Amino acid sequence: MTSIAMWSGPRNLSTALMYSFANRPDFVAVDEPFYAHYLAQTGLNHPMREEVLASQPQEAATVVQSLIRPLETHFYQKHMCQHMLPSVPRDWMFGVQNVFLIRHPARVIASFGAKYEGFGLADIGFSQQLELYEMLQRAGHPALVIDSADIRANPEKMLTKLCAALGVPFDKSMLSWPEGGQPCDGVWASHWYQAVHGSRGFAGPEGPLPELQSPADKALLSAALPIYETMAHQKMTA
């Protein structure tokens, strides 16, 4: 059995990809297990903060133990890169298969800004994603990179390639899921997941990049774009 840690920032197709793997009969999934620790340590006033804090262990070591437990089935872990504060151990990552899910920052900024105000680079995970990827590279531990745009453009082809790289067979059940909330959802799903709850599969190819209007958003794009481009050089292609 294999454990897959999928690393992304917010608004990166991460929930749809979690649903894709969770819909397989041979997988279980966990949704952002370090979220409560992240909120407890940072004091950030995210939507549904108290509900999140009450729903998960707040101690990083306790979360890590839940991620490295003996497996009876394949285990999909959806992680947010920005949740990996200095207080979170990293050594457990060498015992799982790591995949980095990327998305163009213009799309991330536009989508995240519709749900949360006053955010900066640290809130959308780009710097932390590159830091984690480079840590694994320095240690000689292989990691995969996949772009959400490529998945949306051709879900079956990209997921078949991803599964082959992970050493698990592709299953067509990954291409669709029941409409509505899923058992793997975190308690925060009612705020963040409305769009994917209305879906039964991956949305089609994305259109033109959104044009960011505010100076703050444009500055954020300038900071995040070189990081995205660095990661995109390593991505799997169709």
Image (tube, rainbow, N blue to C red):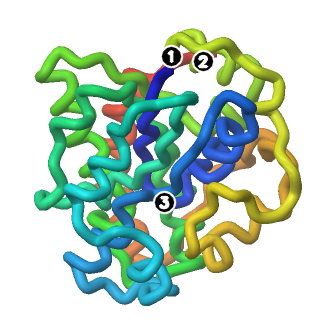
Q: Is label 1 in a helix, a strand or a loop?
A: helix
187 to 211, vertically: above or below: below
- Residue 166 tag number: 1
Residue neighbourhood size for the residue with mark 3, other residues' Cα within 10 Å, grouped as few (<14), some (14–19), many (≥20): many
Q: Amino acid at mark 2?
A: Cys
Point 12% across, 23% down: residue? 138
Q: Which one is in front, 111 or 71? A: 71
Figure check: 10 above or below 78: below
In the picture, residue 149 is in which quadrant? top right
Percent x, y of residue 136? 21, 27
> Is residue 117 at all visible to an observer of this figure?
no
The residue that appears at 28% across and 27% down in the rendered structure is 95
Instruction: Tell me which corner region of the image, top left, top right, bottom left or bottom right, holds residue 231.
Output: top left
Residue type, label 1: Leu
- Dots 2 and 3: beta carbons under 8 Å? no
User: In this orientation, which residue lies closer to the viewer: 207 or 116?
Assistant: 116
Q: Quadrant of the C terminus?
A: top right
**Residue 151 image position (x, y, % from top left):** 67, 32
131 sits to left or right of 149: left
The amino acid at mark 3 is Pro
Residue 234 picture quarter: top left
- From the viewer's perspective, is the residue at label 1 or at label 3 nearer? 1
Q: Residue at x 39, y 80 (%)?
A: 53
For label 3, the residue is 10
Q: Looking at the image, tell me whether mark 2 or mark 3 is earlier in sequence order.
A: 3
Q: In the figure, is residue 193 to the left or right of 222? A: right
Q: Position of residue 161 (x, y in %)?
A: 62, 14
Q: Nearer the viewer, mark 2 or mark 3?
A: 2
The answer to whether residue 78 is seen in the rendering is yes
| Residue under numbered circle 2 | 163
For disc 2, the neighbor class at 10 Å (few under 14, some 14 to 19, many from 20) is few
